[in-house]
Image (tube, rainbow, N blue to C red):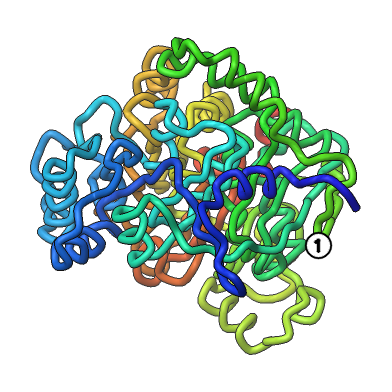
Amino acid sequence: MSGKTLFDKIWDAHVVRSISGGPDVLYIDRHYIHEVTSPQAFNGLRQRGINIFRPERIIATSDHNIPTVNQHLPIADPVSRLQVETLEENCRAAGIRYYGMGDPRNGIVHVTGPEQGFTLPGMTIVCGDSHTSTHGAFGTIAFGIGTSEVEMVLATQCLLQTRPKQMRINVKGELHEGVTSKDLILHIIASLTAGGATGYFVEYAGEAVRKLSMESRMTVCNMSIEMGARGGLIAPDEVTFNWLAQIPSVSDNREFARLIHHWHSLRSDRGAGFEREVTFDASKVTPMITYGTSPGMGMAVNGVIPSPDYAGSSANGSYLRSLEYMGFKPGMKLLGHPIDYVFLGSCTNGRIEDLRLFTAAVAGKKKAAGVTALIVPGSQQVARQAEREGLTETLRLAGFEMRQPGCSSCLAMNEDKIPSGKYAVSTSNRNFEGRQGTGARTLLAGPLVAAAAAVTGKITDPRELVWNQ
């Protein structure tokens, strides 16, 4: 093998120093922070009398704890309010850009960073949040870090990291109509299992990947870690450059043409070596849904819950306990199973494309009685665009209400919790026990499966809802 991978090119360009027999000192171009994982890091620096090294490289937003209604009022929960206020105070003291609740640039950190032009090809990007891998869609090395590492980057703009192994996932062919990028990544995770990419950084390639929009690419990279990967990335191309050209802060840069010329070189060389390669056929992917308490426990929405042996589970007891928690059994079909909640949003599916898909599917229909729908844009910018495009009004006519931006029901750190025992079809990224609330039963899916459930009140194949009427 000869040549370099895309990952190698970016990594090597950011190595400040290599420690013999140890990790590399990696320079970090962009550091995103939010209210949950940063307070302890700021406290650690204060206790040691260390200043923030490069505050201009840091972008802060509040997202996990904020409510999605009445954002003009103080946050009711005292713990959430304290975390948000602490982030604001820390940013003010350090001179860090902060987009707080009510700011027109506020939203989920992995939505606002790209849309504001802070995420650019060839960067190294970190955040104290596991789904930082989202930014890999732009051809970056982006990954989540722990609180002690957040402190390290605040102090030095560098990070000690061991170079991971590399995997390339090729997706040939083309996705069928009614099949989304969320279905694609759920299909991949179900095939490789929740630990199938552990220790690897994944590059997604192939015809089907190149045809994905930027929003869809972000969805795929976002969920890379749900199969154990350190992160995921996609080589930048004309789709990437055209998307960035719509952002004034990027396209108005005098160096934009030169940057595009450089970005064209950010791709794996012919013959570059990967420790592992896997190929999928996009035409085999169908609308997906999860049935357990791991993102790897996924199947076709019209499929049958597999037995432990068929599912490849060596821990049969754990597998069966997961199904028991969900109220399911092996051999069971989920089509027609009643649901209580639908959540459209999160850093996985809270972008304008996701709202368009959902809205088009429910247009002219009515929300099912008894279903609580949480429709949450990923940012204030997405909310404004949905209003301009008439999506908000179409949703209102169908019985839905658009909430204000935030992480919302992706995780139980704000008021948008799913009650115990209730079933929620969720476009978020994790279905762990208690992730959406104590005892909540989460079924991960894409925007179209969520839309079909919202108007029928049960798990429904969206292909039947949208195209067979």
Q: Which residue is at 61% across, 49% downward?
A: 11
Q: Position of residue 252 (x, y in %)?
A: 44, 10
Pick the residue in front: 99 or 66.
99
Pick the residue in front: 228 or 350.
228
Which of the 4 quarters of the picture holds residue 229? bottom right
Q: Position of residue 303 (x, y in %)?
A: 76, 58
Q: Horizontally, is 355 left or right of 267 in the view?
A: left
Pick the residue in front: 435 or 44.
44
Residue 366 appears anywhere in the view:
no
Amino acid bearing label 1: Glu
Q: Horizontally, is 175 left or right of 8 in the view?
A: right
Q: Position of residue 265 (x, y in %)?
A: 72, 30
Residue 289 appears anywhere in the view:
yes
**Residue that badge 1 annotates:** 275
Q: Position of residue 447 (x, y in %)?
A: 56, 39
Pick the residue in front: 291 or 259.
259
Q: Say what secondary structure mark 1 lies in.
A: loop
Q: Horizontally, is 212 left or right of 409 in the view?
A: right
Q: Which corner quadrant holds the C terminus?
A: top right
Q: Which residue is at 69% across, 87% downward?
A: 316
Which of the 4 quarters of the picture holds residue 101? top left
Q: Is residue 3 above or below residue 365?
A: below
Which of the 4 quarters of the picture holds residue 220? top right
Q: Is residue 438 above or below residue 436?
A: below
Q: Which residue is at 46% across, 18% downward?
A: 250
Q: Which residue is at 51% across, 76% downward?
A: 325
Q: Is residue 265 above or below residue 281?
A: above
